[in-house]
Image (cartoon, rainbow, N blue to C red):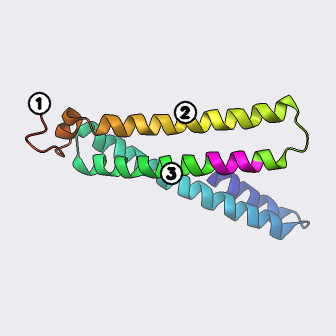
Amino acid sequence: MIGVGALISVASHTTTSTNSINQFFGVISAAIGSVLLVIGIGYLAMSYGLLKGRGWAWTTTIILMFIGIAIQIISTTSGTVLNASLLSNSSSNNVNTVNSGIIGGIIGIAINVAIVYYLYRPNVKAYFGKAHPLEIK
């Protein structure tokens, strides 16, 4: 997206029509790409910490999973309500789109819940140094 933003910005300088709109989309695209790049680097660091059993990685993963669960719940419910309200006729394609959105949201929530459950297992907490000595069996 960073590259696309740069290409759009460069292309907007060569043409005279819709210059400001192209520059706006170029800047927005580059900004979104930069944010996604930083998030990706953060996930790489977190995965390294998880592999090495670092406590900060366990804590960070738990926080991100709860944020992910909240986002999935909000996006699934709001997306379903929005899609249902936009449907003017009840064709099977529109109903399938709503159903697939709900199923996708439920699967995303289930994956996040499974990860949180796994990270709270006593042996996993002990690996990350988060367990109390009495919890380890």
Q: Quadrant of residue 2?
A: bottom right
Residue type at numbered disc 3: Ala
- Where, by quadrant of the figure, is residue 5 drawn? bottom right
Residue drawn at (77%, 46%), measured in percent from left and top?
A: 83
> Taking 135 as reference, is 77 above or below it?
below
Label pair 1/3, CB-CB below 8 angstroms: no
Q: Identify which residue is drawn at 72% across, 55% down.
A: 7
- Three-letter amino acid code at the position of disc 1: Lys
- First of labels 3, 2 by sequence position: 3
The overriding secondary structure of the stretch rendered in magenta is: helix
- Would you place residue 118 above or below residue 60 in this image? above
Write down the residue under mark 1.
137
State which tag comes first along the sequence, 1 or 3: 3
Magenta region: which residues?
A: 76-82
| Pointer 3 residue | 70
Say which amino acid is labelled 2. Answer: Ile
Q: Is residue 15 left or right of residue 103?
A: right
Which label belongs to residue 107? 2
Membership of 81 in magenta stretch:
yes
Find residue 135 and report its horizontal and vertical position in percent: 13, 38
Dot 2: element? helix
